[in-house]
Image: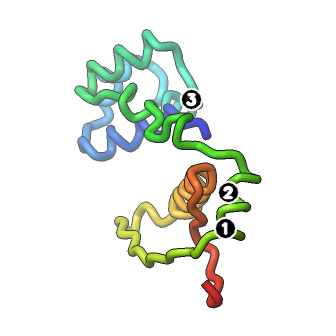
Amino acid sequence: MTAHVGKLIEAVVKEKRLTTAEIKVALGINGRSPSYTYKKKSMSVEELWRISESLDHDFFADLKPVVTNERLHDAKFIERLFRTEKIKRINAAICFPQSLVKDLGLFLKQIGDVGLKMGFKVGDIDPTM
């Protein structure tokens, strides 16, 4: 799972409600549109550091994985657990601003991918469990 750095930057800029002129100063761009930066999937550490300082936001913390390798399991191990152990179920609500509904699918996919590697199935509805 990789993060799209430009989208992270765009989200912070929107959250801070900066003007176009402020955005251009923070991103260190003159003639280009901020959308050029928002489309970048990756960038150099130096560029991201400069933008982090300009926007007073730690993008490196956003990119640090929350799940470490010692909490991840291989798929066969997880499947064996689901076959051999009693399964517990919880229901959870996801709250989000309506304007972010377009990102909900990606969010759920990422939760599912990471959850499965940790031993959690997300979204499967099996009434027998």
Q: Position of residue 30 (x, y in %)?
A: 40, 17
Vertical order, 97 against 68 (above or below):
below
Mark 2 to mark 3 CA distance (whole Å): 35 Å
* Residue for badge 1: 82
Query: Which quadrant holds the N terminus?
Result: top right
What amino acid type is highlighted by mark number 3?
Lys
**Tag 2 near tag 3, CB within 8 Å:** no
Query: Which quadrant holds the C terminus?
Result: bottom right
- Helix, strand or loop status at disc 2: helix
- The part of the image, by quadrant, that contains residue 81 is bottom right
Query: From this viewpoint, which residue is outermost toward the bottom?
Result: 127
Q: Residue at horizontal 47%, vertical 35%?
A: 65
What amino acid type is highlighted by mark number 1?
Phe
What amino acid type is highlighted by mark number 2?
Ile
Would you say residue 106 is visible in this rendering?
no
* Residue for badge 2: 78
Mark 1 to mark 2 CA distance (whole Å): 6 Å
Q: Is 51 left, or right, of 56 in this rendering?
A: right
Q: Is 27 left, or right, of 89 in this rendering?
A: left
- Helix, strand or loop status at disc 3: loop
> Which badge, 2 or 3, comes first in the chain's sequence?
3
Q: Position of residue 20 (x, y in %)?
A: 32, 34
Q: Position of residue 38 (x, y in %)?
A: 50, 34
Q: Residues within 10 Å of mark 2 (few under 14, many from 20)?
A: some
**Tag 1 near tag 2, CB within 8 Å:** yes
Q: Position of residue 67 (x, y in %)?
A: 48, 41
Q: Residue at horizontal 39%, vertical 74%?
A: 93
